[in-house]
Image (spheres, helix red, strand yellow):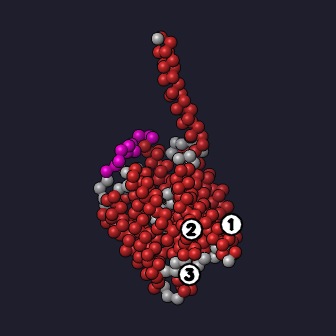
Amino acid sequence: MTESFSMDQTMVVAAFGVGIVVGLTGMGGGALMTPILVLFFNVPPLTAVSSDLMASAVMKPVGSAVHLRRGTVNLQLVKWLAIGSIPSAFCGVLILKALGDEQSVQAGIKLALGIALMVTAILLVVRAYMRLVERARTRSGIGPKLPQGRPEVTPRVMPTLLLGAAGGLIVGLTSVGSGSIVIIGLMMIYPGLKASQLVGTDLLQAVPMVAAAAVGHMLFGSLDLGIALPLIVGSIPGVYIGAQMSSRLSGGFVRRALAFVLLASALKMLGVDNVTTGVILVAALLLAPVLWMYLRRRYGFPALAYTEKRQSAQARKLADAPAASNDSGQGNER
């Protein structure tokens, strides 16, 4: 009884930390929580996926309501994504059920989860690179200026349906992808959308998708309320605090740390031995910052983001100085 209570408390703390990351970055819920349950709490993969989906089904509507109030949701895109994702998310659960005996199911989920985590880590890097290129094109005048108002986009029905179907299937199988794979697809299909609309649209479309997968796991999966409830208790306040912190902390730093954690989790889920995992992680830790600084310099930015922020702050001070001087001179003339 004491050991179970202690585990519940630890799960609440873990879910709280994951919730903060989700609030900060808009992604990472299933990609972090499911491998944490499997690797650190020895929860069977099927139970981990089922429990995490139930927690996400409760957590997602909270953030969605905020974006709806702010008008940062494209409801047409949500509609077509949901039409594709709801049945495919449910089918993902049926595929797990069709894998056969318990051992085959657990092995299949672990493999699928490892692949999904690896893809998510790669897509985080792709997303950062796309943002860098977009900033460089906008600043140099080569690309169009970023939209200031709410951009109007014409839904591309078939690509959007296929994106929803692919995202729903992966979520139904692994609980990973509702906040990473779909948003990358939206960026590629609708490059004119503002970042806030990308996040808001992705978050709202994830509500019915995750709910469908959660219902499927309730019927055919291995839902354990003793695991799901601590996740819900910890994640909801974590998401709220993370959202409050998002305006003060660098989301880019958090996403880079998240990509590193996802890479480590993916390697372990795929059964890579400890020595090889260590070599890959050390190489990523040493080479990735150097490569990123090179890319920043290549696109005309300082190697370090901190330097860019400092230069921007100095430029704003210089721009404000003449205005302050003019105000002072007018006061003396009076």
Which SS class for mark 3?
Answer: helix
In the image, 103 versus 71, the foreground residue is 71
Magenta extent = 139-152
Q: Of callouts 1 and 2, which one flags the residue occurring earlier in the amino acid sequence?
A: 2
> As drawn, which residue projects farthest toward the bottom?
101
Which SS class for mark 1?
Answer: helix
**Residue drawn at point x = 63 percent, y = 76 percent:** 42
Residue 238 lies, with reference to residue 232, above or below; the image says: above
* Cα–Cα gap, marks 1 and 2: 29 Å
Residue 132 lies, with reference to residue 174, above or below; the image says: above
Q: Residues within 10 Å of mark 3 (few under 14, many from 20)?
A: some
Q: Position of residue 223 (x, y in %)?
A: 52, 78
Which SS class for mark 2?
Answer: helix
* Cα–Cα gap, marks 3 and 1: 23 Å
**Mark count:** 3
* Residue 287 in view in this figure: yes
**Residue drawn at point x = 47 percent, y = 15 percent:** 330
Residue 241 within the segment the image draws in magenta: no
* Residues at marks 3 and 1 touching, judged by CB atoms closer than 8 Å: no
Q: Which residue is mark 3?
A: 107
**Residue drawn at point x = 56 percent, y = 46 percent:** 248
Name the quadrant containing residue 230: bottom right
Q: Which residue is mark 2?
A: 231
* Residue 112 in view in this figure: no
